[in-house]
Every structure is written in structure tokens, then in C-alpha cells.
Amino acid sequence: MMREMLKSKLHNARVVDIKLEYSGSLSIDKDLMKKANIIPYEKVDVYNINNGHRFSTYAIPAEKGMICVNGAAARLAMPGDRIIIVSYCYMNDEELKKYKPIVLILDENNNITKQ
């Protein structure tokens, strides 16, 4: 049996910018992507703490500290909003025996405060 499990979580990320006219995606600090094991174009779900909106998109790398909501999803967030960014993976019961997701807690400048 395969189970869908949390793979990576960036908790309390702060939206720095929005770009409505961009073709889509979520720009994430490339160092955060690496530490969270999120690769370019990987599907991510985004949960906006400020307004409750939830959406799916894909991750693209950005410069240090950047979290930018692009395309149509830019209507669902504002600069300063706190969001949760998650990715999932499928695992079998054997893999789950030694499984632990990556959870990174971020501060208001998108620096890691807790791993």
C-alpha cells in the first residue's frame, strides 16, 4: 500500500512579493528549497495563514529571502502574508518505518529559526 505523506514543510514563510502577470508558480529562496528537499517545478501546496486561501502550484528557485506568489495565485496572497508551503510524497509501509518529514520554521525575513 502506498500512502501520501508530508515530505517537506516551510512553516510561517512570509510573502515578499506578488506578480500577477507572471506565467505562474511560487518563487522560493533557492537555499530554502534545497534545505527542504524541494526541487524546481515540484508541485507544492500553499496555505495562507492570513486569509485561509489554499492553492497548488509548482516551485521555482529565487534569490535569498524571496517568497513570491506568481500568476493567478497572486490574487490569493499579499506581501506580508504568512504562508505554509508543503510538498508530499508517496511511501510504502516499509519506507515509513524510518520516515521523518523535513519541517523548517521561518522568521519574518524567511530565515530558518527551527529545523
Image (cartoon, helix red, strand yellow):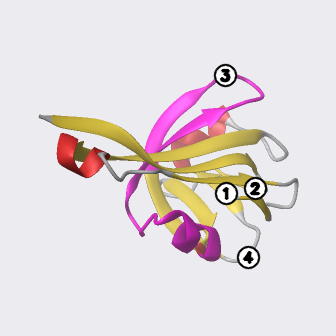
Which mark is in front, 1 or 3?
3
Mark 2 / mark 1, whichever is N-terminal: 2
Q: What residue type is labelled 2?
A: Asp
Mark 2 / mark 4, whichever is N-terminal: 2
Q: Mark 1 points at which residue?
A: 68
The residue range painted magenta reads 31-57
Q: Mark 2 points at which residue?
A: 17
Q: Which amino acid does label 1 sit on?
A: Cys
Q: How crowded is the residue under tag 1: few (<14 C-alpha within 10 Å), some, or many (20+)?
A: many
Mark 3 / mark 2, whichever is N-terminal: 2
Q: How crowded is the residue under tag 3: few (<14 C-alpha within 10 Å), some, or many (20+)?
A: few
Residue 4 locus on image (x, y percent): 29, 37
Residue in front for this viewpoint, 73 or 56: 56
Q: Residue at x 38, y 51 (%)?
A: 99
Q: Name the residue under label 3.
A: 52
Q: Name the residue under label 4.
A: 64
